[in-house]
Image (cartoon, grey):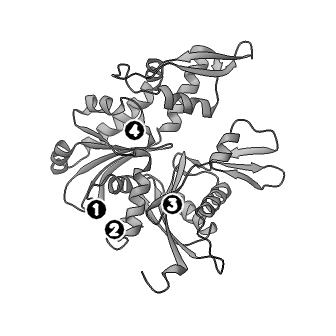
């Protein structure tokens, strides 16, 4: 620690489509949904994170809820700036004498363009960051899982987030090949909403479809420990009256099949493009799953059946990327060439 280290603070941010996680001093200090509630008339931010999520789908005309990120990239610049600033404020690293300079490492999808990268940096700068570095999600996930990414050994990571699924082969501290597809948790939610509308004539909101995914979401129709049926409340499309229906995991597995198939196809394409020496390594080490999407029941078994390779689900997959970003920040010199 330098003499003036107290003048600057280092934070790692996993800026996700569904959730934003901030690490400070090796601890997760903020884990909030990536959503902002704004008053239309004044443009004032009313709530950020969990409080804004509670308002989502329940607002009147003077309040709007905005999800600033879509498909892993910033879709609403001003709202993302508000969100980052408010979440940094939640950390409580203010000093009574001065505002410390912020050094940030932010996680980004591997498939985003330079313009989209610039938008992330600009938002962070507007939120008060003095120095900003970016690290790709699959690399951060690999570091967070505990893989030694600097070794000359091939490892394959599948990171299924809210907006994108990142599939990458990593060796010698670099991404050898990667496939970034915009099919992920949000698409699973959209599939569930569509299924409820078509199959049960019931309209449900984003929060309800997310809840269904968590309670009875599955990737295969045969589970060893199936969850109980889940009672869904929504609006009947024929009568307009609220009603309740019960759904089971087999229904949800069937309605998610198309989206999961697209992820499987991307995994196969990434394996096809992998150099043979690294393919030999992956045969021995298997494939690692991270991100909130990897919590879908039976997803590991489904991918394993498709690729005939061992699948390892990361410990606490939701925070694997944030952990890796934090480790990269802490060992800045060691991982400096991985960070842009």
- Can you tell which mark lies on residue 173? 1
Residue ID for mark 3:
117
User: CA–CA distance between discs 3 and 2?
Assistant: 19 Å
Q: Residue at x 50, y 18 (%)?
A: 229
Q: Please, what secondary structure does the residue beneath circle 1 have?
A: loop
Sequence-wise first label, 1 or 3: 3
Q: Residues within 10 Å of mark 1 (few under 14, many from 20)?
A: some
Q: Residue at x 36, y 71 (%)?
A: 336
- Can you tell which mark lies on residue 294? 4
**In the picture shown, does residue 277 fall above or below 5?**
above
Closer to the camera in the image, 86 or 82: 86
**Residue 2 can be seen in this image:** yes
User: CA–CA distance between discs 4 and 1?
Assistant: 24 Å
Residue 276: % across, % down: 16, 47
Q: In this rendering, which labeled residue sits more in front, label 2 or label 1?
A: 2
Sequence-wise first label, 2 or 1: 1
Sequence-wise first label, 4 or 2: 4
Residue 86: % across, % down: 65, 60
Is residue 240 rendered to the left or right of residue 173? Answer: right
Q: Residue at x 46, y 60 (%)?
A: 27
User: CA–CA distance between discs 4 and 3?
Assistant: 26 Å
Q: Residue at x 65, y 81 (%)?
A: 97
Q: Return the residue found at the far front.
A: 96
Asked which quadrant contains residue 61, the reply is: top right
Residue ID for mark 2:
335
Closer to the camera in the image, 196 or 168: 196
User: CA–CA distance between discs 1 and 3?
Assistant: 21 Å
């Amino acid at each position: 620690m330098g003499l003036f280290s107290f003048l600057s603070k280092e934070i790692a941010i996993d800026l996700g489509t569904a959730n934003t996680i901030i690490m400070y001093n090796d601890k997760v200090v903020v884990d909030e949904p990536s959503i902002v509630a704004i008053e239309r008339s004044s443009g004032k931010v009313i709530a950020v994170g969990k409080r804004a999520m509670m308002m989502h789908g329940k607002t009147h005309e003077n309040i709007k809820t905005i999800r600033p990120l879509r498909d892993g990239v910033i879709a609403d610049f001003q709202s993302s700036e508000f969100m980052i600033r408010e979440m940094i404020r939640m950390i409580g690293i203010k000093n009574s004498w001065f505002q410390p300079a912020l050094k940030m490492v932010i996680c980004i999808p591997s498939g985003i363009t330079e313009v989209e990268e610039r938008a992330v940096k600009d938002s962070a700068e507007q939120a008060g960051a003095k120095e900003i570095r970016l690290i790709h999600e699959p690399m951060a996930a690999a570091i967070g899982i505990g893989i030694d990414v600097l070794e000359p050994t091939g490892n394959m990571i599948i990171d299924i987030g809210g907006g994108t699924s990142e599939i990458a082969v990593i060796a010698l501290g670099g991404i050898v090949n990667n496939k970034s597809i915009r099919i992920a948790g949000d698409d699973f939610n959209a599939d569930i909403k569509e299924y409820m509308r078509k199959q049960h004539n019931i309209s449900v909101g984003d929060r309800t479809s997310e809840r269904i995914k968590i309670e009875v979401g599955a990737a295969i129709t045969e589970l060893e420990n199936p969850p109980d049926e889940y009672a869904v409340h929504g609006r009947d499309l024929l009568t307009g009256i609220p009603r309740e229906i019960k759904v089971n995991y087999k229904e949800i597995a069937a309605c998610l099949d198309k989206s999961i198939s697209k992820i499987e196809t991307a995994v196969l394409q990434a394996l096809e493009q992998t150099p043979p020496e690294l393919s030999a390594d992956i045969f021995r080490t298997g494939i690692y799953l991270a991100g909130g999407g990897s919590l879908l029941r039976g997803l590991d078994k489904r991918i394993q059946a498709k690729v005939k390779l061992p699948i390892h689900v990361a410990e606490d997959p939701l925070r694997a990327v944030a952990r890796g970003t934090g480790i990269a920040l802490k060992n800045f010199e060691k991982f400096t060439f991985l960070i842009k």
